[in-house]
Amino acid sequence: VIAWGAAAFVLYGMSMHMGMAMFPLFVTDTLGGTAGEVGLLVGLCALLEIPVMLALVTWRRLPGVPVLIAAGMGLFVLHFGLVVLAGGMGALIAAQVVRAVVLAILAGLGMTYFQTLMPGRFSAATTLYANTSSVGAMLSGITSGAVAQTFGYRSVFILCAALSLVAWGVMALNNRRTTHA
């Protein structure tokens, strides 16, 4: 269960880092946007993350952490789908709102997820969580560059959506394993 959870987080980290690296290039080179628009979009996501985290903390009837983690990964598919289909600022703004929700869930609860799977081993769980992001970042660099070079920036976001979909599927199956174990 721990290995599958880590695999899902590596895929999430890979798609997160690929999307983050290619987003400014996609907006300016593919959609003809400006650096100012990129700044607005990235800033909007950052601005919304904290209020979303606070809303999650105050929401009384939240599902459990594993369900929220899977939901966050599923929402990441939506985020990348919106980016792929974007023709202008409207869809990109919607995509950044979804991204803020995803990051609030997964950044806020990712470590908790691993600590729950590894009770009494908080240091190991925290290290594992942090390493999934590092591995995802390493894998994303060459992958996003090669895909963008070969197929264009939009294709990177299609790949990100696919990776997020697989991460969601792995997490959903993992959640079934833990509830039926």
Image (tube, helix red, strand yellow):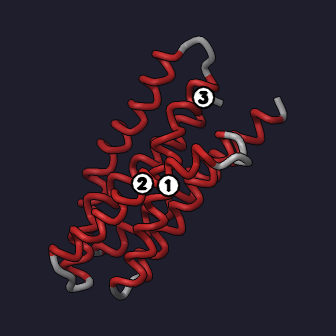
Crowdedness near tag 2: few (<14), some (14–19) or many (≥20) residues, C-alpha within 10 Å: many
Indicate the quadrant containing the C terminus: top left, top right, bottom left or bottom right.
Answer: top right
Across and down, in percent, residue 96 comes to 40, 67
Q: Look at mark 3 in the image and give the residue it sits on.
A: 2
Q: CA distance from mark 1 to mark 2?
A: 5 Å
Query: Marks 2 and 3, how far apart in space?
Result: 27 Å
Task: For marks 3 and 1, give the one nearer the viewer.
Answer: 1
Instruction: Give the residue furthest to the top.
Output: 120
> Tag 1: residue type?
Val
In the image, what residue occupies the spot 45% across and 75% down? Answer: 94
The single residue placed furthest to the front in the displayed view is 58
Q: What amino acid type is highlighted by mark number 3?
A: Ile
Relative to 179, is 36 on the left or the right? left
Q: Residues within 10 Å of mark 3 (few under 14, many from 20)?
A: some
First in sequence, mark 2 or 3: give its number: 3
The disc labelled 2 sits on which kind of residue? Glu
Q: Residue furthest left?
A: 35
The disc placed on residue 52 is 1
In-front residue for pair 83/89:
89
Q: Secondary structure at mark 2?
A: helix
Quadrant occupied by the N terminus: top right
Q: Position of residue 14 (x, y in %)?
A: 39, 49
Return the x and y of residue 28 as percentages of the image width and height.
19, 78
Q: Are marks 1 and 2 in contact (CB under 8 Å)?
A: yes
Could you tell me how far apart the alpha carbons at marks 3 and 1 are, in whole angstroms?
Answer: 27 Å
**Dot 1: what SS?**
helix
* Residue tagged 2: 49
Coordinates of residue 15 in the picture (x, y in percent):
41, 55
